[in-house]
Image (tube, rainbow, N blue to C red):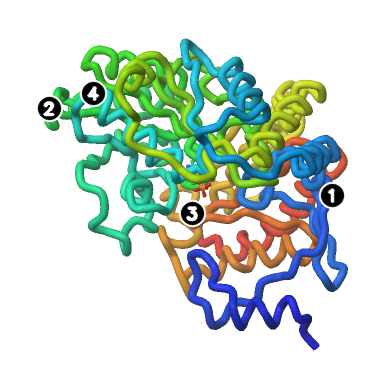
Amino acid sequence: MTSQAFQDDRAHVFHSWSAQRALAPAVVVGGEGAWFWTEDDTRYLDFSSQLVNLNMGHQHPRVVAAIQEQAAALCTVAPSFGNAARSEAARLIADLAPGDLSHVFFTNGGTEANEHAVRMARLATGRHKILAAYRSYHGATTGSITLTGDPRRWPNEPAMPGVVRFFGPYPYRSPFHAESEAQESERALAHLDEVFTLEGPQTIAAVILETVVGTNGILVPPDGYLAGVRELCDRHGVLLICDEVMSGFGRCGEWFAVDRWNVAPDLITFAKGVNSGYVPLGGVVLGPRVYETFAERAYPGGLTYSGHPLACAAAVATINAMKDEGINERVRRLGEEVVRPRLAKLQERHPSVGDVRGLGLFWAIELVKDRATREMLVPYNAAGEAAKPMLEVAAACKAQGVWPFTHFNRLHVVPPCVTTEKDLSNGLDVIDDALDVADRYYTG
Ligand code: PLP
């Protein structure tokens, strides 16, 4: 006997990214901290933070209270009015942002933030090309899906003109045949420099990159890479847009991941962790170069819900709770003291673990069939039968009560930043067991 919620879902809900007919979504009825539970009372430890947005966990009491209080006072107001929740959220975010970033344009999520960042960069520079990385995800609306490098772009092309692609650093599968991180950084920068030259720097408005590439691999840039990109952009009057939709607000143990490398972009896009997704919110943080472009001339863009009071009140409460709970320090400690050594052990124990990498609570376990050739456990963009090994690994995690995040041949370890040390450790034990399933497909 299925529930009304399930039946209505199957009859009327059209889901993202999916062939609809065979879907059977678990119906979630509650959550607390790093845990959520379904209508049949199955409890899961959320090692995916939903879509890597639930940084403060489910039902954080301060965030829930802030939304309730704002709802009681004023649920909504048009963006042309001032509003205390929006002003405070903008001040807090601008204060946390690096360099001279000072103003926030609020959106409903990450993809809109990237759409607007690109529009701002094009108008501020008077140029049209945007350089974006192959291994990237920037959102699902027309412009952002074109910026996206991963296969979700393919069925949506042609979409936005003017996007040129480059390779970012990926030491484990170096596109530059590098043998060290330093060499990877150097060669990735030389490659980008060449793309600039071949495209004509005077035609390039911006480079957009995920500070730490998220869904497409948790690719932590080698030291020096981001500073090198910044320098290259400065040399040619090109704006640097850092997409921190996934990497920001605690995920990397920093407010913004760029803080780790002391690099200040011209524009930062954010969403997800800014309020843990309790109410949809994203935005662009911008500095003087873009601000001044629109100081006397109208910005040609807007949204009915830009700076929505409920979403902004949730952001204020989230940021204040993160500060009071020392979330960034906690995440850095858990990343270095718990996750890094545990994943190193998994790599020793399981032949199918080709690489482990990450920082904070943002980690990837990359699975291979053969360590020598680094053949992926499942092919790039595998679907159907070819994807089976990864589906089985995920099923093994779920069977033991851990909700995993998988992408291609990787298992990501991305639990909420508030996960207790004990839960974190238990979740890693479950992953340890589930990797036995991957080992069965090892052929090396
Ligand atoms: N940018 C990055 C790096 C993301 O990870 C995502 C979503 O996963 C987006 C943009 C798109 O955000 P949204 O789904 O809120 O539109």
Q: Earlier in the sequence, mark 4 or mark 3?
A: 4
Label 1 vs label 4: CA separation?
46 Å
Q: Residues within 10 Å of mark 3 (few under 14, many from 20)?
A: some
Task: Report if the CB atoms under discs 1 and 4 are less than 8 Å apart.
Answer: no
Q: To which quarter of the image does residue 8 belong? A: bottom right
Residue with the mark numbered 4: 125
The three-letter amino acid code for the residue at tag 1 is Glu
Q: Residue at x 52, y 39 (%)?
A: 306
- Distance from disc 3 to disc 1, alpha carbons, whole Å, reads 40 Å
Q: Which residue is mark 1?
A: 32
Q: Looking at the picture, does residue 76 appear above or below residue 319?
A: below
What whole-number distance in Å separates the C-alpha atoms at marks 2 and 1?
52 Å
Q: Is mark 3 in CB contact (under 8 Å) with mark 1?
A: no
Identify the mark nearer the N-term, 2 or 1.
Answer: 1
Around disc 4, counting alpha carbons within 10 Å, would you say few (fewer than 14), some (14 to 19), or many (20 or more)?
A: some
Residue 370 bears which disc, if any? 3
Residue under numbered circle 2: 200
> What residue do we see at 79% from left, 36% from top?
66
Give percent across and percent down for residue 392: 63, 68
Mark 4 touches mark 3? (CB < 8 Å): no
Q: Amino acid at mark 2?
A: Gly
Q: Is residue 381 left or right of residue 5?
A: left
Q: Position of residue 411 (x, y in %)?
A: 60, 51
Note whether ligand 1 is within 8 Å of mark 2: no
Q: Nearer the viewer, mark 2 or mark 3?
A: 2
**Residue at 48% from the left image edge and 62% from the top image edge:** 378
2 or 79, nearer to the observer: 79
Q: Residues within 10 Å of mark 2 (few under 14, many from 20)?
A: few
